């Protein structure tokens, strides 16, 4: 089973590559959650990266762990279905933008609440938000605000 790496979010067509900038990961004013999380992940400090990766991996089943990102997460299959997957600082440091983008794309489709929780954690980290830049940070915060708004106000 193959999973598309560039699955659109709410109709926004995107292309993501390891060298993709936040501008390339957006269509007009709408950035994808996977692109924002992957970019924030790549500029976060290692402890936060390990915590975020642990949360993302915990929401993924064993088959997906084996096939996502070319099988790079297969070492965590024995921990599949645990509420928390132990991720070392070294593993978090090795995770690339494209691997995290693919993981978040899958998680967003299978567990949208987890993707939102991870985005919330990343937006609360001042260092990460500073490194992201004002435009991407504003898009992330606007997305979270839109998700929190009652259906009639969206």
Image (cartoon, rainbow, N blue to C red):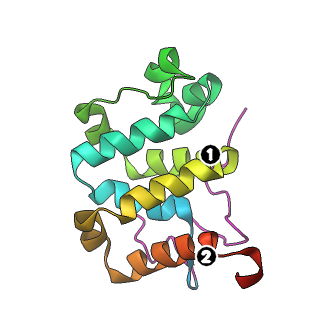
Highlighted range, magenta: 1-27
The quarter in which the N terminus is drawn is: top right
Image location (x, y in percent) of residue 112:
64, 52
Q: Name the residue under label 2.
A: 146
Q: Mark 1 points at which residue?
A: 106
Q: How many numbered badges does the structure rendering display?
A: 2
Magenta residues: mostly which secondary structure?
loop
Secondary element at tag 2: helix
Image location (x, y in percent) of residue 95:
35, 41
CB atoms at circles 2 and 1 under 8 Å apart?
no
Among numbered discs 2 and 1, the one appearing first in the sequence: 1
Which residue lies most toward the right here? 152
Image location (x, y in percent) of residue 67:
59, 30
- Identify the residue at horizontal 61%, vertical 76% (top origin): 146
Image location (x, y in percent) of residue 57:
49, 35
- Identify the residue at horizontal 39%, vertical 45% (top origin): 52
Q: Is residue 122 above or below residue 11?
A: above
Corner quadrant of residue 42? bottom left
Residue 8 as seen in the image, left or right of residue 41: right
Residue 2 as seen in the image, left or right of residue 46: right
Q: Does the magenta stretch include residue 12?
A: yes
Q: Nearer the viewer, residue 91 or 140?
A: 140
Q: Tell me the crowding category of disc 1: few under 14, some 14 to 19, or many 20 or more residues within 10 angstroms, Cα based.
A: many
């Amino acid at each position: 089973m193959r999973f598309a790496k560039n699955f659109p979010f709410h109709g926004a067509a995107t292309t993501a590559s390891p060298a993709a900038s936040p501008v390339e990961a957006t269509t007009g004013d709408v950035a994808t959650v996977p692109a924002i999380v992957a970019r924030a992940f790549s500029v976060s400090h290692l402890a936060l990266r390990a915590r975020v990766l642990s949360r993302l991996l915990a929401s993924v089943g064993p088959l997906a762990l084996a096939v996502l990102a070319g099988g790079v997460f297969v070492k965590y299959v024995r921990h599949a279905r645990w509420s928390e997957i132990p991720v070392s600082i070294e593993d978090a440091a090795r995770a690339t933008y494209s691997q995290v983008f693919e993981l978040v794309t899958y998680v967003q489709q299978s567990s949208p609440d987890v993707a939102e929780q991870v985005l919330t954690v990343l937006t609360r980290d001042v260092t990460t938000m500073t490194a992201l830049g004002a435009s991407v940070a504003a898009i992330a915060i606007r997305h979270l605000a839109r998700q929190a708004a009652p259906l009639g106000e969206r």
